[in-house]
Amino acid sequence: MTLDQIDQSLLAAKLTIPQCYVRMVVPRLHLYHKLDDAANYPLVLISAPAGSGKTTLLSEWLRRQPSFPVWVALERNDNNFLRFWSYFIAALEKLNLPIGAIIQPLMSSSSEEMWIVLINALAGLSVDVVLVLDDYHVITSEAIHRFVAFLLEHSPPRFHLVISSRTDPPLPLVQMRVQGRMVELRMADLRFTLDETMTFFRQMMGLSLPIEAIRSLHEDTEGWVAALQLAALSLQDHHASSINPVLSLSHVGNNRYIVNYFLEEVLAGVPEHVQTFLLATSILQSMNAELCNMVTGHTDGEAMLEWLHQSNLFISTAYDTNGWYRYHRLFGHFLHSHAQQAYRDLLPLFHFRASTWYEDHNLPVDAIDHAIAASAFERVVLLLEKHASSLLRQGQVGIVYTWLKQLQERGIVATHALLAYLYACNYLHAGRLADYEQSLLQAEQCWRERGQVEMLSKINHLHAYTALLRDDGILAMTYAQQALELAPVRSSLAGISQVLLGASYISCGDLLQAHIALLHGQRNCQCDRDSVLPSAAALYLGDLYLCQGRLQEAMSYYQQAIQRFDEYMPWYPIVAHCHLGEVYCELNNVSSAEEHLRKAMQMADDIAVHWILPWVPLLAARIAWLHGEKEQALQWLDKAEYDARRLGELRVILAYALALRVRYLLADGNVDAAHYWWERYEHSLFSDEIKPSLFTGDMRSLTCARLLIAQGQQEEALAVLEDRRSLAQKQGRVHSEIAILVLQACAYEVAGDARCGKQVLEHALFLGEPSAYRRVFIDEGHAIASLLFRMYERQKKYHAHNNGIFAYMCSLLTGFGYNIDQGDCNGNAPHKRINSSLISVLPAARQMIDPLSEREQEVLRLIAEGRSNQQIAQTLVVAESTIKTHLNNIYAKLNVNSRLQALTRAYAYGLLAQQ
């Protein structure tokens, strides 16, 4: 057959740049620019799976090109070399080159002779010519591949070949890459970006989908153009306005258009043994050859993966390391759905084999996942017993609880001690305290019988933990001490015990011992690098410094609790965000408090740990009140109380909610309602049968006193407050002492005792000024504002402008809304002296005549590290009696009576560096 004879059967459409049949095409400028470089290279290769938009991209790019483009759309019957050659020459003749006339006389010559004549003819081109061979993957003829390779090797300078293919063609690509003679575009390049996906749906397809839906579609399709087009058709069929805003992978993957596309365009052209491999390995998120061999039971995994990768069959490298692959998300979902029908009976076997491989390679998470998928529940329990403890230490709490939930849904009961313990943890974090106690008791009895000491230490941790939740610090301390006795020295178990012991000491008011225990726990955190310990220790250290009225140090530790958390263990950071928000509220920085509330809410939405959630509405209530949203604040308190009751009467939450509610109702003038809420909760929250924590006790005294003041019973209120203030002062709890002093000042002011009111308010100002307390004063309203303004007038009169307390008073009055002349507070007054009445209430640290000696400062620093007298004596190589003498001197100079008071006073005035 001659060239002329074949020319009669050529289809003109195959030599025409195809048109796009959608209304508009998404412009892909970044790809057009990359293709523009074609003028500098002999070859442009676009190799990507079906439906990647190769043809559309090329046709749109060529319409923008100043070069002369020619096109050949290839089909399977073009594997006849003479037919291929005929189309190739016919395409070039569209450039008005007499190539056919030159080649015709040589049809009986050798192929290489014809090719040389063709290349010489193309060498005379005066303009750049781009020839596209579309769908080159259909070509299997060795003769054609040899011709194209020869053409590329001797390519004329102004001739550029573009090959579009679903697979990499058998051409010398490696050599051309090394020589820098080709441009490549692959699946990753052709994927739509999120912006392009939005443009496609909204402008091209006219679908007004919300951004969440578009983002979901984009992620599930991984920007695969054909899938987006088919999904858009499906949405048009079903009226997009009624579609759920967030479309799931299952929704898109089960789309009949996409399923049919994969069946007809992908699987139909794949050999049967490859289909079997695809369906069997569809259970894997990622795979390598060895894993595939285990799952399939064959030994061709490496060859199959290489073939799939070279064929661009919706597979890509999974990691930076060689040998690991994954399927395109949508394709993987399609394969797995198809496998559930075709291989329903074999899938459990495939999962079991995968589980075995992952266990052998020390990948317990995947091993358990596949064991559950295989319904091999005995294996699941064995794997959990073997790996759960280490997974929990690594912070994999969320996924462990997911497994437990799946076991519970399948009726797997806690027949093993560790499984019972894990169930107990799960019930605790879900707020199901009755189920929690039953499962914990079962685990404890089993481990006690076996004498498994370390596991009993963990049981005591949970007992201490729940005791803290229930506001029983003494019981928590007992359990924490027992746990510490059972735990190995310098272990994570010991660290958790010490942290819980420190939290128990805080609850009971022994802040010095709390500090020592928490520091020991923190050291164990650093040694063991346990994921939950650093966050827990930092949170409780923040609570400790908050008790001491050191707001800046508390904030620093709360930030550490947030920064040092694992994504699977977010409850300590959530509480830390809430406590940080509370501190920012106190500093009158509402915007920062709102930011921490937002973050706490965002984290809380993602977890199933419910007992920490009441802290969120409590902060929300306080912020709402500061914004003047009174009803909203009370609704948030309703939610906090509901959550606290649902989770087992969390007394700390209920006491705080009651204190805020009574304060807000009284501020709004609703005394009867405030009294009603007090009577409703007084007996259940503040029963004498249970000794409350310091926090709950403070809330009780402050709330009771506030009601008494509102009812005109100032003397009774002052008696309640004085007892509580004495305890707070003795324990060094400056945060509570400030609140009590301010309320005492209110009571004195309402009773008309200006002298006593002024004295206690001066003391509150002195304690509050180093940390810049604000709302504790401002929230008490007119009584404090009036008293504070009279004090300000007197200080101003006596020219005490250089006094830090005076500047503090100015800032507070500004917060009350007074228009204070800032010049009064800048310290530039000509006569500088401090009011003598103010000096009378200042502790000795502010007016210390005899400073601490160098040795006394060293002893003070060692006290701050939690050292005992004996340890300090050993460190300084002196007698223990000498240390006692130094301590007595320090107490006298600082005008204090205990170690804790000395540390508090020293930190407040810079004698010790802030930590």
Image (cartoon, rainbow, N blue to C red):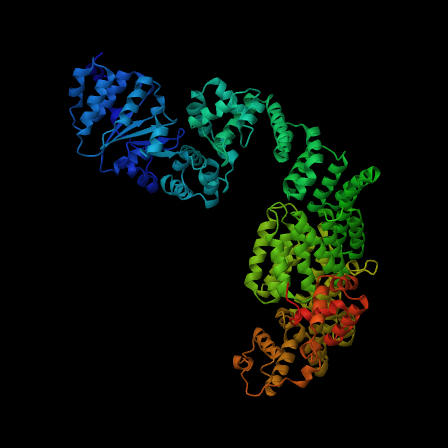
Q: Position of residue 21 (x, y in %)?
A: 32, 32
For this orientation, the residue located farthest to the top is 1
Residue at 62% x, 53% y: name it.
574
Q: How many marks?
A: 0
Whether residue 545 is visible here, answered yes or no, is: yes
Q: In which quadrant will I find the N terminus? A: top left
**Residue 560 occupies which quadrant of the picture?**
bottom right
575 w.r.t. 280: above or below: below
**Residue 377 occupies which quadrant of the picture?**
top right
Q: In which quadrant will I find the C terminus? A: bottom right
Which residue is at the front of the view, 262 or 84?
84
Which residue is at the front of the view, 770 or 4?
770
Q: Judge from the rendering whether residue 632 lies leftward or rightward of residue 182; answer left or right.
A: right
Q: Position of residue 202 (x, y in %)?
A: 39, 43
492 w.r.t. 376: above or below: below
Whether residue 630 is visible here, answered yes or no, is: no
Q: Position of residue 750 (x, y in %)?
A: 70, 78
Residue at 16% x, 28% y: name it.
96
Q: Judge from the rendering whether residue 372 lies leftward or rightward of residue 74; answer left or right.
A: right
Q: Position of residue 355 (x, y in %)?
A: 62, 29
